[in-house]
Image (cartoon, rainbow, N blue to C red):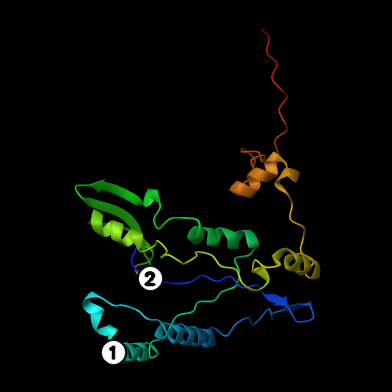
């Protein structure tokens, strides 16, 4: 719930080259993480130094150019973290992971334990203490302040697409990529049975016998009623 600006990026394991053919990345090597960390830090701080910002309160002294330049220079001595890992087994799991950040609010309702006497108590996980679930109690004003830290400023967008996923001419590019990589055609939901739809949504096969967990239940005969 504290201020922690960060970016999540999903990068394809390859792309279209200048001849319109698919160029795949190596399975053993994708991106040099340490180099990427330094490059991201350099690009971020370079463009930050070009902005005309106004500072208030305890950091008001940064309004002086020499102080701001010194502040930026000091940030180059700090290691910036870029965490890179392979995808989570399948595209569906990648989408599920990203959905936690792109289509949810700062805190889920179930985490809010109580709201009384001007205080809010909510649950949180302390990853530094064996991932233990703990409770935190803050004033309502402090809770609202932390919540609004997660509201994007004017002009910012939550999701942006680049490269082969950029909006311009996206459909022809994606179609070509799928053809070159022999990607299976997306199945329309109208082509699926009710059982298949439930499996996709809940990840469970509801047609599986609840007793033996190996056989499948037969479709029951329709009930006959008489007036």
Q: Say whether residue 222 is visible.
A: yes
Q: Residue at x 64, y 69 (%)?
A: 166
Q: Tell me the quarter of the image containing the N terminus.
A: bottom left
Distance from disc 2 to disc 1, alpha carbons, whole Å, reads 23 Å
Residue 58 — which label?
none
**160 or 218, nearer to the observer:** 160
**Dot 1 corresponds to which residue?**
67
Q: Say whether residue 214 is visible.
A: no
Q: Residue at x 64, y 43 (%)?
A: 198
Q: Residue at x 41, y 71 (%)?
A: 5
| Residue reaching furthest to the left | 117
**Dot 2 corresponds to which residue?**
4
Q: Is residue 26 above or below residue 178?
A: below
Residue 59 percent across, percent down from the top left: 25, 79
Q: Tell me the quarter of the image containing the C terminus.
A: top right
Residue 128 percent across, percent down from the top left: 35, 70
**120 or 127, nearer to the observer:** 120
**128 or 20, nearer to the observer:** 20
Query: Which tag, 2 or 1, sits closer to the chain's start?
Result: 2
């Amino acid at each position: 719930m504290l201020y922690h600006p960060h970016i999540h990026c999903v990068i394809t394991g390859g792309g279209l080259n200048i001849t319109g053919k698919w160029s795949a990345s190596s399975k053993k090597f994708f991106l040099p993480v340490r180099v990427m960390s330094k490059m991201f830090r350099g690009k971020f701080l370079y463009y930050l130094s070009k902005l005309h910002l106004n500072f208030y309160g305890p950091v008001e002294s940064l309004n002086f150019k020499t102080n701001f330049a010194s502040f930026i220079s000091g940030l180059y001595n700090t290691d910036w973290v870029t965490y890179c890992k392979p995808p989570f087994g399948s595209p569906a799991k990648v989408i599920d992971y990203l959905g936690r950040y792109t289509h949810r609010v700062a805190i889920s309702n179930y985490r809010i334990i109580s709201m009384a006497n001007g205080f809010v108590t909510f649950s949180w996980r302390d990853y530094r203490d064996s991932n233990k679930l703990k409770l935190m109690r803050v004033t309502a004003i402090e809770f609202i302040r932390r919540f609004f830290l997660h509201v994007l400023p004017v002009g910012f967008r939550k999701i942006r697409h680049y490269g082969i996923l950029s909006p311009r001419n996206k459909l022809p590019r994606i179609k070509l990529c799928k053809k070159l990589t022999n990607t299976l055609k997306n199945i329309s939901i109208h082509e699926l049975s009710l059982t298949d739809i439930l499996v996709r949504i809940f990840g469970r096969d509801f047609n599986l016998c609840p007793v033996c967990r190996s056989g499948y239940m037969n479709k029951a005969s329709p009930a006959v009623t008489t007036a």
